[in-house]
Image (spheres, rainbow, N blue to C red):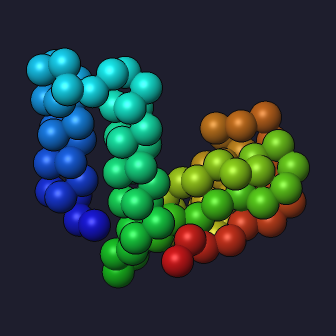
Amino acid sequence: MDRISAIRNVEDALRKFEEGEADLAATERRVGTVLRTFATEFETDDRRAYRGVGGPGDGTVVVAPSPTAARERIAALSDGEPDDIEPII
């Protein structure tokens, strides 16, 4: 999913919430799903999505140019470095 498609899906979810066609919980789920799909399909020539595995950064997902940079970003966002880093494919 590219950025434009993700934005359109989020806008559609917000419109449905504003019009009373969806409640907050459903809107949160839909927006979360859009973001998760965007993140798992994210990859450019110089960046990709990585997930921290184990330790304080377990489950934290960031976009970075390398595993080393991802480890640093995850550590900055959580209470410490993860045990490992895995690319999200």
In the visual, does 72 lie left or right of 6? right
Is residue 23 shown to the viewer in this render?
yes
Q: Where, quadrant-wise, is the N terminus in this rendering? A: bottom left
**Residue visible at 18% across and 58% down?**
5
Q: Quadrant of residue 46?
A: bottom left
Q: Position of residue 77 (x, y in %)?
A: 64, 38
In the visual, does 68 lie left or right of 63? right
Q: Position of residue 37 (x, y in %)?
A: 40, 60
Most foreground residue, 62 or 75? 62
Name above or below for residue 32 compared with residue 2. above
Most foreground residue, 45 or 20? 20
Q: Position of residue 33 (x, y in %)?
A: 42, 49
In the visual, does 13 lie left or right of 26? left
Q: Quadrant of residue 36?
A: bottom left
Q: Position of residue 48 (x, y in %)?
A: 46, 70
Most foreground residue, 24 or 50? 24
Can you name the residue that lies furthest to the front here? 21
Count of all numbered marks drawn on residues in the image: 0
Most foreground residue, 30 or 1? 30
**Residue visible at 27% across and 27% down?**
22
Q: Quadrant of residue 3?
A: bottom left
**Residue visible at 72% across and 67% down?**
85
Is residue 66 shown to the viewer in this render?
no
